[in-house]
Amino acid sequence: MPTTKSKSRQPPVRSQARRAARLARPVQHRGLEQLRRRFEAFRDANPPTARIPVPLRKAVVALLQEGLTRSAVEKSCGVSWTQMDQWAELYGAQPSLGDLPPSRAARVLSVVDDAPRPVETSEPPVEPLELRLGRWSITVRPVGNAQ
């Protein structure tokens, strides 16, 4: 019995060829071409283990923020996706003060003890001071005779 291959089981040769051709084409972007030349000059002047300088890192982040694809930057500049993630976190757009959630206002709490007050002396009594920050509490109180 002869077997025939159905078209649904054959790999889509045409789409793979198109994809390969599209990936082989360089991305036409002026900023990317300038950055590629800067990376090339940096790599020619430095050993392979040299750290990439901050201006080059920031330029990569700027291109990504303009909407350039990571794969285009990776192919042109030789920068990994992990590096791009780290640089975007470090040098990406920082949230402005308007974007931050409002902080809770500080509250002053008075502490009232039911303990009897000592007899009045010439100096006012010094009571402990308690500062509360979230779940933390700091208490400051005098030790012994402070003179």
Image: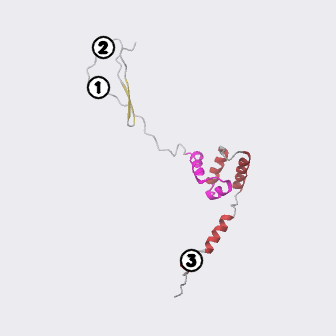
Looking at the picture, tell me which residue is in the foreground, 44 or 19: 44
Q: Name the kind of residue labelled 1 in the image.
A: Asp
- Residue bearing mark 3: 10
Q: Magenta span has 23?
A: no
Identify whether 86 is placed above or below 143: below
Q: Residues within 10 Å of mark 2 (few under 14, many from 20)?
A: few
Q: Count residues near mark 1 (Cα–Cα under 10 Å), then give few for <14, some for 14-19, many for 20+.
A: few
Residue 92 appearing in the image: no
- Which callout, 3 or 2, points to the residue nearer the camera? 3
Q: Which amino acid lies under the numbered mark 3 shown in the image of this protein?
A: Gln
State which tag comes first along the sequence, 3 or 2: 3
Report the residue at 46% width, 42% height from top. Answer: 102
Q: Nearer the viewer, mark 1 or mark 3?
A: 3
Check residue 70 for magenta coloring: yes
146 left or right, relative to 11: left
The residue stretch that appears in magenta: 66-94
The residue drawn where x is 64% and y is 56% is: 74
Residue at 72% from the left image edge and 49% from the top image edge:
38
What residue sits right under mark 2 in the picture? Answer: 120
* 118 left or right of 18 in image: left
Q: Which mark is residue 113?
A: 1
